[in-house]
Amino acid sequence: MDVVSVTDADDPRVALYRDVRDRDRIGRDGVFVAEGEVVLRALLGPRSRFAPASLLIAADRAPALLPTLPRHAGVPAYVAAPAVMDRIVGFPIHRGILAIGEVGAPSTAEALLAAAMPPALVVAALGIANHDNVGGIFRNAAAFGATGVLLDAHSCHPLYRKAIRVSTGSALTMPFAQLAPDADVVATLLAAGFDVLALSPRGEMSLAETRRSQRTAILLGTEGAGLPDAVLARVRTVRIPMAEGVDSLNVAVTSGIVLHHLAGLTPG
């Protein structure tokens, strides 16, 4: 890893880090922004699904951090004084650790599901527009051994900086695919041989009664509206019992509870 000192915030070599908040758009320049030590180690680690392009490290963090990172030949580590780094990214970057990763070719839903060998457990999410919830779903999926995550076109992309950070880097290691705008998620899952369990407070069966098949997918909807009735009518529906008067759970919390339950079951 080549260590390069940067003293000028306008240095063209760090152009991809300039005004990070404006550049945090997946698909722009074919890259994404990763932030923080835990996320950086995930990006550089052996389980990462993405290639690093460069690092930008605050000078007060570099001496202790850089010698402990996995080596990637040809990937520059730019080191800048904290004040210079703040001017580059456009705001005070307290963690002092950023990286650029290459998005690469996206996976398709069909390829993701075909690669999910039994016993497979897939999380499918519809309309999850909140970065924190997407990151939380990925973190839970990794924690409980899910095979992959499938998102519809209306969900937040998991490679947004905040989503990656909330996932503690799991968005960089967990296989995922995003559906086309006109795709039918239920038909896609059923065609791949998955038993689909849709989470709803009005679910026909309690989570405790739910069993796991060799290929199981859990289907999560946006907070508030939940999954559309037209979707719920086509699959088995599951509820998490709650105290009277409580409407629903946060969708990321729901994913953790359901994945924990299913991870403890022997697939039938």
Image (cartoon, rainbow, N blue to C red):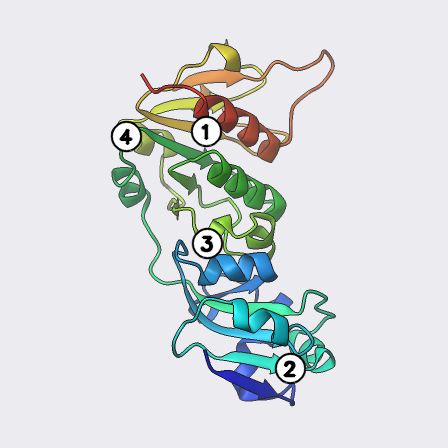
Quarter of the image where one finds residue 92: bottom right
**Residue behind mark 4:** 118
Find the distance from the CA under tag 1 to the CA under tag 2.
44 Å
Q: Residue at x 53, y 76 (%)?
A: 16
Find the distance from the CA under tag 2 to the CA under tag 3.
25 Å
In this rendering, the label closer to the viewer, 1 or 2: 2
Q: Is residue 104 visible?
A: yes
- Circles 2 and 3: CB atoms closer than 8 Å: no
Check disc 2: other Cα within 10 Å, few if <14, some if 14-19, many if 20+. Answer: many
Q: Tell me the tag on residue 107.
A: none
Check disc 3: other Cα within 10 Å, few if <14, some if 14-19, many if 20+. Answer: many
Q: State which quarter of the image contains the C terminus.
A: top left
Q: Nearer the viewer, residue 15 or 234?
A: 15
Q: Position of residue 140 (x, y in %)?
A: 53, 37
- Circles 4 and 1: CB atoms closer than 8 Å: no
Q: Earlier in the sequence, mark 1 or mark 3?
A: 3
Q: Earlier in the sequence, mark 4 or mark 3?
A: 4
Q: Is residue 206 visible?
A: no
**Residue behind mark 3:** 172
Quarter of the image where one finds residue 6: bottom right
Q: State which quarter of the image contains the N terminus.
A: bottom left
Q: Is residue 239 left or right of residue 189?
A: right
Find the distance from the CA under tag 4 to the CA under tag 2.
48 Å
Q: Earlier in the sequence, mark 4 or mark 1?
A: 4
Residue type, numbered disc 3? Leu
**Residue behind mark 1:** 219
